Amino acid sequence: MFRATVLTLFPELFPGPLDASVLGRARADGLWALDTVNIRDFSDNKYGSVDDTPAGGGAGMVMRADILTRAIDAVPRNDRPLLCLSPRGKPLNQTRIHDLSRGAGVIALCGRFEGVDERVFSCRDIEEVSIGDFVLAGGEIAAMALIEACVRLIPAVLGSASSLGEESFEGGLLEYPQYTRPREFEGRAIPDVLLSGDHRKIAEWRRKQAEDITRARRPDLWERYQTRGPIRSEKNKDETS
């Protein structure tokens, strides 16, 4: 079973949206599990503080290495990677999410303040990951995004596994446009091809739309797609080899 453990100063933020809709039902059904660890429980003072002023001066506070490593060491790894949500981390992508979702789970370390004492990274096997080129007040929202992205790929969590293969980033392209009733809305009609019943033409239209949208909105993805071709996860590669 996929188990997510979050090390945080704000355990009350969880499960939050991770307990809603299909994710919450899947957790109740035992398809995945979530634990939180309050980093303040490992503080060495009666105030529960976990930070101190930065060496060399500067604004803000830095999370202490001794307290953080005590919290980290209290969590059984069980073959799970320890990930620190950080804007300086390697950007997460769908390929990495697929890999994580097929594992035993993740341990997510949520930073706060100006960051984490650098010695934590050199003393423990930690992978820094980023959900985008922007800065949040802490790693909790990023951890939720990471966990949700993984959990929704677990078999039986979503109603239709076949829909996963045509989402954005699957195969290296952004997703094609979607439509539903009413047939016409404010003078805009559903494209005729989608109502034609011709599955070959529909597939061709969707592929072209995905390519056009990717080319226009994400030239970086388009260039990679042009160079490497369709991207498949390791699982899909195994199934077709």
Image (cartoon, rainbow, N blue to C red):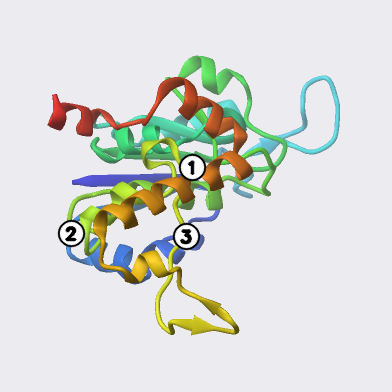
Q: Residue at x 54, y 45 (%)?
A: 212
Vertical position of residue 39 compared to residue 179: above or below:
above
Residue sitting farthest toward the right: 58
3D distance between C-alphas at marks 2 and 1 = 38 Å
Q: From mark 1 to mark 3, how far is it between C-alphas?
A: 11 Å
- Give the residue at x 13% y 32%: 239
Q: Is residue 35 left or right of residue 158?
A: right
Question: Which amino acid, mark 2?
Answer: Gly
Whole-percent x and y of residue 76? Answer: 29, 34
Q: Position of residue 56 (x, y in %)?
A: 83, 19
> Quadrant of residue 102 in the image?
top left
Disc 3: which residue: 177
Quarter of the figure with residue 22? bottom left
Which amino acid is tagged 1? Glu
Q: Which mark is residue 30?
A: 2
The residue where tag 1 is placed is 211
Callout 2 crowding tier (Cα within 10 Å): few <14, some 14–19, many ≥20: few
- Whether residue 151 is visible, yes or no, is no
Tag 1's secondary structure?
Answer: helix
Q: CA distance from mark 3 to mark 2?
A: 34 Å
